[in-house]
Every structure is written in structure tokens, then in C-alpha cells.
Image (cartoon, rainbow, N blue to C red):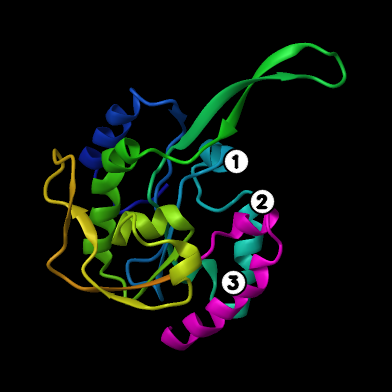
Amino acid sequence: METILTQQLMKLAKERNKEFPVEGFLWGTGPIHPRFMLVGEAPGEVESLNGIPFTGRSGKELMKFFDFLEVTREEIFITSAFRSRPFLEKEKIEKKTGKKIMRKYNRAPTKKEIIAHAPLLDFEITTIDPPIILTMGNIGLQRLIGAKAKIMNVHGQLYEGPILELSSKEATEFTWSKEDYRIFPTFHPASIFYNRKLLELIYEDLALFKEYI
């Protein structure tokens, strides 16, 4: 798969993955001059297998959002805060057999995991210099403008200013960029599976976002 990431960056990220309970690896995909950049959270089970962001259940909802925005997937650079699927193994009893099996469940990436993959998103943002960044979900939002930003409080509000980045690949804490960026936050498509009422808020946000693109 084509990627703007360097072999060195990908090798570094995969090596750092070894200490975490994660699987798969996701490349950012899209044109070098996109209409906008979309920053999600982390891949789920489907994405961890095919390496393509937003191709699972939430991806189907995202395509509806793109139709509303009158953009195509090919016009957007799609990436995420963390590039591998973070999972938690739990015991489950199969209904048919009654046997106990271990199953992997999605979980949110930890701060340590996000920092391990931070050079990838830093590189994509500085290389592409997107006109505006659409973040979907708390993790993508907080990766860029800090943990104090809560999606329920700031969704649909344009942020213009510096973003968080690593000063070097070896750094373990974020610093603020010298450059300013435009960030527009809304909810993750998967959020509507747990709270259908959020769908209306998402479309309200997207109507505002449409004015910026």
C-alpha cells in the first residue's frame, strides 16, 4: 500500500509496538493535497486485518458523512492517533457449545501507546500541511490539543492554534508546535452505535464544517 511514511518511521513504530497488546498496522491513506485531513482514534478488528482506516462498521457511517459533505474518500487524507488495534483479552462462554474461549475486545490506546506512534502523525501533518483537520472522537482530538478538550464540550467549534507534537522521535512528552493549525472536532462514527441521539449532533457539526471546506 502506498504511504507517505518513511521506512524508518514505520520500522520504529512497529518496534515500539512489541511491548503493547496490539495487532495490525495502519497506514494513513489519501492524497498529498487533500480537501481536509481526518484524524480518527485507532483501528478496530477489520482495519487491523486489511490495513485500511475506516473500513469496518464505522466506515460505512463515515461514507454517509462524506456524502453529506459532498466529498469522496479519494479526496481526503485519513489517518489516526494510533496505528495498531489495541485489544483486551477476556474470557467468553460460547452460546452454542458452552465452552470458555478467550476473545479480543477493542480498547482505547494508552498515552504511552499514542506517544509511541506520535512521530507518524507528526510527519503526516507537517508533510501534508492540511488546510483543516477534522478530528473524530476524543482520542484524535486530545492527541492534537490536549486532554482538557472534551468532545462533548467542544464539538462543532473551530480551533485555530498550535497542536501537540513530539520535539524528537525519542521524546516522551508532547510540546506545542510553532505553527498554527485549524482543528474541527466532532464525534466518532462509532459513537452512534451506543448513543443514537449523537447522530443529529454530528450532522449539525458537519453542516458547520462544510462551510470551511
Instruction: From the image, give the main secondary structure of the stretch colored magenta.
Output: helix
Q: Residue furthest right?
A: 96
| Marks 3/1: CA–CA distance | 24 Å
Are circles 2 and 3 on residues that touch, CB within 8 Å?
no
Give whichever of discs 3 and 1 has the lower sequence position.
1
Q: Mark 2 or mark 3: which is in front? A: 3
- At label 1, the amino acid type is Val
| Marks 2/3: CA–CA distance | 17 Å
Q: Is residue 44 left or right of residue 109?
A: right
Give whichever of discs 2 and 3 has the lower sequence position.
2
Are circles 1 and 2 on residues that touch, CB within 8 Å?
yes
Picture quadrant of residue 30:
bottom left
Magenta region includes residue 50: no
Mark 3, residue position: 202
Q: Residues within 10 Å of mark 3 (few under 14, many from 20)?
A: many
- At label 2, the amino acid type is Arg
Are circles 3 and 1 on residues that touch, CB within 8 Å?
no
Magenta region includes residue 194: yes
Mark 2, residue position: 57
Give the secondary structure at mark 3. Answer: helix
Q: Is residue 5 left or right of residue 138?
A: left
Front residue of this view, candidates 154 and 112 = 154
Front residue of this view, candidates 202 and 70 = 202
Mark 1, residue position: 46
| Marks 1/2: CA–CA distance | 9 Å
- At label 3, the amino acid type is Ile
Which residue is at a point 33% across and 42% down the rendered structure image? 114
Marking on residue 159: none
Stretch of the chain drawn in magenta: 186-213
